[in-house]
Image (cartoon, rainbow, N blue to C red):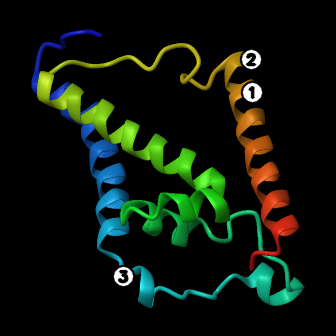
Amino acid sequence: MTRPRGYGQVALRHLPWVVLSGMVLLASFFLPLDKFSVRTCAFLWLTGYPCPSCGWTRGVVAMANGHWMTVLHDCPLVVVLYGLTALIFAWNAAALILGVNVERGRWLSMSGKQGGWLFGVAGLMVLANWIYRLAMGFK
């Protein structure tokens, strides 16, 4: 954690993440889950099987509206993604409020071996979630 010379440096570094993650969290909270039936997945339309990210949007909306047990059953990876989004928002909002630049650390810097491992683990999680959804028969 470093205290920069001016608040502009803090805002430049953390404000875009607060806005982006905050928009995702707010939009997911205000989208009506009962009227949300987007079926525009080209992969699903062409193959009859859901793509690796099918169900994520509905899952994020359900998480925001407190239906986390349903999400845990339907698309467990969304619980992790929603939690990470909330964590990104809180981390960067705290940096803005405190007026400090919060460093990411070596695992989140996405350089070298650590970035490759992080990318590989994320890919395996997406694959495991997709296999789970296919095995459960979700579309």
Q: Secondary structure at mark 1?
A: helix
Quarter containing the C terminus: bottom right
Quick one: label 2, few (<14), some, or many (20+) residues within 10 Å? few
Among the 4 quarters of the image, the one containing residue 80: top right
The type of residue carrying mark 3 is: Pro
Give how far apart the Cα atoms at labels 2 and 3 are: 42 Å
Q: Residue 50 versus residue 120: which sits nearer the camera?
A: 50
For this view, does 139 lie left or right of residue 9?
Answer: right
For this view, does 99 lie left or right of residue 35?
Answer: left
The type of residue carrying mark 2 is: Lys
The mark that comes first in sequence, 2 or 3, is 3
Q: Is residue 113 above or below residue 95?
A: above
Give how far apart the Cα atoms at labels 1 and 3 are: 37 Å
Report if the CB atoms under discs 2 and 3 are less than 8 Å apart.
no
Residue 113, numbered circle: 2
Quarter containing the N terminus: top left
Give how far apart the Cα atoms at labels 2 and 1 are: 5 Å
The mark that comes first in sequence, 1 or 3, is 3
Residue 136 at x, y = what percent? 82, 68
Residue appearing at x 76%, y 75% in the figure:
138
Residue 34 at x, y = what percent? 43, 86
Q: Which residue is mark 3?
A: 32
Q: Which residue is mark 1?
A: 116
Residue 114 at x, y = what percent? 69, 18
